[in-house]
Amino acid sequence: MAQNRASDAALLTPREMGEADRRTISAGTPGIVLMERAATAIAAAAIERFPAALRIALLAGPGNNGGDAYAAAAILLRAGRDVRLFHLGPPGKLSGDAAIAAAAYHGPAGALSEFRAEAFDLVVDGLFGAGLSRPLEGEVAEVVTRLKAAATPVLAVDLPSGISGETGAVLGAAVAAEATVTFFRKKPGHLVEPGRSHCGAVIVADIGISDAVLSEIGPRTFETGPALWHERLVLPSEAGHKYDRGHAVVFSGGASQTGAARLSATAALRAGAGLVTVFSPASALLVNAAHLTAVMLKRCEDAAELEERLGDGRLNAFVLGPGFGQAENARAYAQAVLAAGRRLVLDADGITAFQDDPATLFDAAGEAGKARADGEPALVLTPHAGEFKRLFPDLAAADDLSKPVRARQAAARSNAVVVLKGRDTVIAAPDGRAAINASGTPWLATAGTGDVLTGIVAAQLAQGTPSFEAAAAGVWMHGKAAEAFGPGLIAEDLPTMLPRVFALLAGG
């Protein structure tokens, strides 16, 4: 695969995007040139994605998004489309580059109150972009509501009007677009729900902003994908052997609760760990032995026996929680693994075991991280929303916090990499980095798929990939495996799809 750069995966907040614009203009590119390039991309998307759309309405807001709409309307008019522009507020009140673009448009126009979506084949939404900070109301909210009720497809400029570029939240009302054209880099609002569902297909247009501005801006939010973590991912080498690829361990529950651990273990082996062992209580040894082949099996009955097993330094990544069911042992095992300086993926029952005393877990994770020579967080937490609430009830209840902010604050508090699961899974590190995932399908919403995710992440940890990148890569692989299988997916199918995901990585 060609070399990737994390900057390619950067997501820019509205403030950061404004800074990218400002620095580009200061370096000598006039703002109107950026606007004309943006308009060219908008018009091209309208023509290419909606070729049968001859009657096109463009909605122009009072800022630069409105300027983009005016400039795009002029291009579409020259391309032979039947264009009509509807403006929010008199064009004469526009300023700066938006005023220049409005003055250059000589086609039909009218007030926003005159707009009726049913009269057009396509609507280009240029009312408000990523920088919207207050709820839509009044006439605009009414127009957006009518537009959502109409059958006319929408192409959004930057972000659908009413979606926060920072959080993905709906501010009062929001346009639902079939496609969205944004510029230079995506925003968090393109990936975080409910914004993600409102954007449709997201097209990122190059308008001539240099990647060099990113080193000056220093973004801390990214889209999960190979550009973010491929350079840090540890893959098998030509001269390597299984012991180079780490040894992952998955703790099993009792005799009637063994399936989740085996799902995790199988996934860890498929995802690249050189060796995988299930640590099982005596009561479940025969059940596990009847199902395991390449995955090894050892007895682990209590904390004393685990301490003995931890004497083997080759056991370097652990999974605790899936189907485990024993709160007291879960607490003891987690603390023992962390005290030994090993990396631990904690999920499900492992998370719930600490709901009455999360500080003990967080302190243990902090000490383990300090003790590690590589300085990497030793703990990876993989909660869904309900499990997150058990460890971080105040963050879960804070309606004013976006999902990335919740995950970031949780990571800082817990001294762990936090994987806050969902369609828009967020991965956050204690140092403030966060990544938002866009891979996957609705078919992942079925029993056991989270257990598979823990194994995939553990495999990357076992091979020596840094914790944040291991978690981000694991989440992306998990989603891509689901995409490769398609409809009808159950958890057992996911590990069998991982070879296709690795082939995809190898092939670029």
Image (cartoon, rainbow, N blue to C red):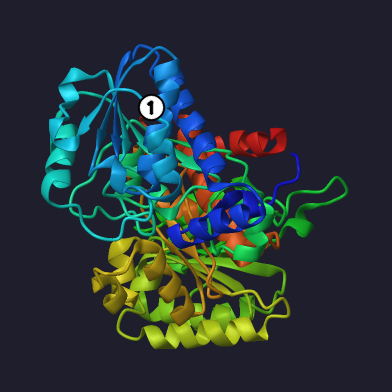
Would residue 274 be found to the left or right of residue 42 on screen? right
| Residue pictured at 51% horizontal, 43% vertical | 183
| Residue 412 in picture, x, y percent from top left | 48, 78
Query: Residue 178's quadrant in the figure?
Result: top left
The answer to whether residue 152 is above or below residue 34 is above
| Residue 463 in picture, x, y percent from top left | 70, 59
The amino acid type of the residue labelled 1 equals Ala
| Residue 216 in picture, x, y percent from top left | 65, 64
Query: Residue 357's quadrant in the figure?
Result: bottom left
| Residue pictured at 26% horizontal, 49% vertical | 162
| Residue at the outermost right position | 239
The answer to whether residue 182 is above or below residue 243 is above
Q: Where, quadrant-wise, is the N terminus in this rendering? A: top right
How many residues crowd around disc 1 within 10 Å: few (fewer than 14), some, or many (20 or more)? many
| Residue pictured at 24% horizontal, 68% vertical | 399
> Residue at label 1?
73
Compare residues 292 and 46 and report the one nearer the observer: 46
Query: Residue 37's quadrant in the figure?
Result: top right
Q: Where, quadrant-wise, is the C terminus in this rendering? A: top right
Is residue 449 visible in this depiction of the protein?
yes
| Residue 3 in picture, x, y percent from top left | 75, 45
Would residue 372 be found to the left or right of residue 444 on screen? right
Would residue 388 be found to the left or right of residue 438 on screen? left
Judged from the image, the secondary structure of the residue bearing numbered disc 1 is helix
The answer to whether residue 465 is above or below residue 197 is below
Is residue 248 visible in this depiction of the protein?
no
Compare residues 328 and 91 and report the one nearer the observer: 91
